[in-house]
Amino acid sequence: MRVLDRACVIVHRHVTTTYPPGASIPSTKQLARALELPEKHVLQGLLRLDALGEIALHTGTLPVRLRPREPHPRDRALHGAVRDRIRAGYYVPEQALPTGLLGAEFGLLPHHVRRALQFLTADGTLRFDAHGPYGPGYYVPAAIAGGESAPDPTAPARGRRREPRR
């Protein structure tokens, strides 16, 4: 394992075990002193945690440890826009989202767009398809775009009686 990778693991372990969700995290310099690591390695560890959505950096205050299933503050505008566009029919069922354009529009790097869209995937607003019709990407589910809930695969078909199993 590379030195930088080890440092990132140390930073991750320290932050996730020492600071509860919602707590402020000390500055990079303070963490580097406490962990006896170079500042640049601590910063890389914090940047990785930020990309994963574990903490929020560069929000105008000290870094903050995010709560489970709490959206990253910089992702909220993208979340709202994607949801609004789905409701308005701008994104149609089974359409792949233009992730590069969304990143440019909201000033997010590709790994930050991925973080934001993974959050929307987890709540069912989008789905990720590695083998989608337009290649790997985030797609609008048909049930969400149409405003209907997804059909229950265990429910009997409408208009036909379900035959008992033998």
Image (spheres, rainbow, N blue to C red):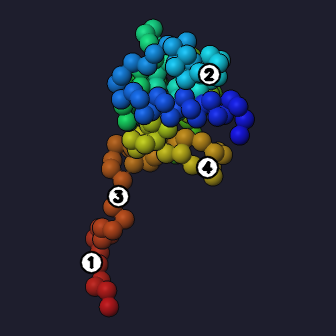
What residue did someone put label 3 on? 151
User: Which numbered disc covers residue 37?
Assistant: 2
What residue did someone put label 4 on? 130
Image-based side of 41 in relation to 61, left or right: right
User: Label 1 amino acid?
Assistant: Arg
Distance of label 4 from label 1 (alpha carbons)? 37 Å
The part of the image, by quadrant, that contains residue 162 is: bottom left
Distance of label 1 from label 2 (alpha carbons)? 68 Å
Where residue 118 sits in the image (x, y, percent)?
A: 49, 38
Where residue 39 sits in the image (x, y, percent)?
A: 62, 16
Circle 3: element type: loop
Mark positioned earlier in the residue sequence (2 or 3) = 2
Using the image as rendered, state which of residue 104 and residue 9 is in the foreground.
Answer: 9
What residue did someone put label 1 on? 161
Q: Label 1: how many residues lie within 10 Å, few (<14), some (14-19) or many (20+)?
A: few
In the rendered image, the quadrant that contains the N terminus is top right
Q: Are marks 4 and 1 in contact (CB under 8 Å)?
A: no
